[in-house]
Amino acid sequence: MEKLKEKFAEKALPVAVEMKQFLKEHGDKVVSEVSVAQVFGGMKGVPSMITETSKLDPDEGIRFRGYSIPELREKLPKALGGFEPLPEGIFYLMLIGDLPSENDVLDLTADWGRRAIVPKHVFNVLDALPPHSHPMTQFSIGIMALRTESIFREEYHKGMHKQDYWSATYEDAMNLIARVPRIAAYIYRRMYRADDHIEPDPKLDWAANLAHMLGFDSDEFKRLMRLYMTIHSDHEGGNVSAHTNHLVGSALSDPYLSFSAAMNGLAGPLHGLANQEVIRWIFAMQEELGTPRPTKDQINEYVNKTISEGKVIPGYGHPVLRKTDPRYSAQKEFAERYIQNDELIDTVHNIYEVVPPILKSLGKVKNPWPNVDAHSGALLINYGLTEYDFYTVLFGVSRALGCMAQLVWDRALGSPIERPGSTTLEILKKKVGAD
Ligand code: NMX
Ligand code: MLT
């Protein structure tokens, strides 16, 4: 068995035993009550699943195995001469629970490099789609086409024992992570670079290779991709993409089915598609106002107009967070370090000053602060990746790290099929004694 897989087994299998014992002893204790508002409100705040990879605090933001984003930017191994963590490191941390060494990360890069070959039929399937299909449609279909390679599916068909589920899932998860950058880059080059495709470079790390295959070879863009892939990877278990991955996986659907479904959730404008919507909204504002650098007064007016038209301000608000998303702040710091005098980035920072007071004044928005999507597009545009329809695919490539780490844990812990209860208005009325 390879080293990482062995380490995972050593770590996870005793946790599975501990969890069974914990459940046996404490299974009947009550940890939460559910209000009527939560039943109607998308189950927010109802603890209803176990996710070990990361935990979201409303005020502090995400912590991966206890580490905040600023801590991880300092502590995770970096590429030679770089400031940004290698995403290999965050995956290792989520999977194993400990910070990786430089060698652990190098081993992962090499392992994913070996697994990265995408079979030709996947490209044929993508080529068969109309070129104007949204990149997220293509991404989801590309992942489904890759399902021919599922080891879990094959082993299940042969009659695999329950205790081996995690092992087959691990193999699929690692192969999927290794291959999605190639699929994403293929979609990009097909749609926007006249089918002029670029082969992976085996000398590069996972994120740098993605940058290379997209056709962006500068050191700075590679650094951006390392940061981007690290910070978008996971946001505990309840967000739409991770939860979908978990839910579909709970039926023992293999990782390709689960992750493709997760990507269909990520493609919604209230979730990951918000990164393209932010740029679309800013461009529309610039066009309407006839200036690439609107003043704060002009932004104010445009924000009010957007709200009065019954639309949301993309990139602002969050179902859990109640402060500025630390992923927004990490990207702002990146911009301040590397980019000076950029009209779009300055506009993003001006929007940050204008939007929160307006959203607060509405009296209903629970979180008026920016989320991860408010900043990411402006950075990509600065480096020439201007095709904003594609941005959610990049979010999706990163999310493969979290979703796959979560799914391997689900299988190791023997997570059962998920099946929450539903109720009716009549039943609720009776329960609370309403007429
Ligand atoms: N602009 C205008 N109105 C908003 C916004 C916003 N950015 N955020 C929330 N509201 C409204 C919301 O539509 C709702 O209105 P109504 O009662 O009339 O239906 C009200 O405020 C209460 O919503 P909340 O409870 O604060 O937010 P909720 O948890 O339901 O939704 C989001 C969270 C993220 C879906 C919501 O804030 C939103 O639509 N934001 C804009 C889209 C976005 O940036 N999504 C990306 C999230 C991060 N990600 O990558 O997934
Ligand atoms: C995410 O990264 O998944 C988003 O911030 C949405 C969420 O956490 O619900």
Image: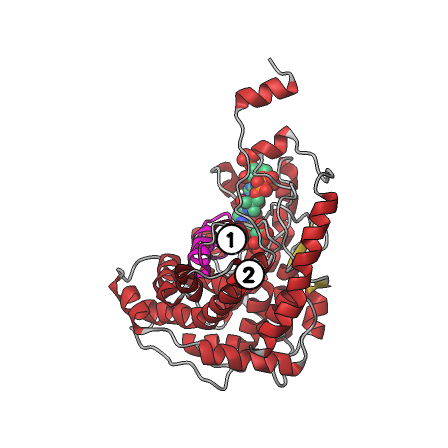
Report the residue at 63% width, 74% height from top. Answer: 85
Under mark 1, the amino acid is Ser
Where's ligand 1: which quadrant? top right
Quadrant occupied by the C terminus? top right
Q: Using the image, determine if residue 68 lies above or below residue 115.
A: above
Residue 268 lies in the magenta stretch: yes
Give the percent coordinates (x, y) of residue 409: 59, 60
Report the residue at 68% width, 47% height from top. Answer: 322
Give the percent coordinates (x, y) of residue 58: 69, 49
Give me the disc on residue 241.
Answer: 1
Give me the disc on residue 41.
Answer: none
Looking at the picture, tell me which residue is in the foreground, 233 or 168. 168
Q: Is residue 390 visible?
A: yes
- Which is nearer the N-term, disc 1 or disc 2? 2
**Label 1 CB, ligand 2: below 8 Å?**
yes
Crowding near the residue tagged with mark 2, few <14, some 14–19, many ≥20 C-alpha atoms within 10 Å? few
Report the residue at 69% width, 72% height from top. Answer: 99
Q: Using the numbered discs, state the Cα–Cα distance from disc 1 to disc 2 in whole angstroms.
A: 26 Å
Q: Is residue 315 visible?
A: no
Give the percent coordinates (x, y) of residue 126: 30, 65
Give the percent coordinates (x, y) of residue 432: 65, 20
Looking at the picture, tell me which residue is in the foreground, 373 or 347. 373
Under mark 2, the amino acid is Gln
Magenta residues: mostly which secondary structure? Answer: helix
| SS assignment at label 2 | helix
- Segment tinted magenta in the rendering: 253-275
Tag 1–tag 2 contact (CB < 8 Å): no
From the image, tell me which residue sits under label 2.
163
| SS assignment at label 1 | helix
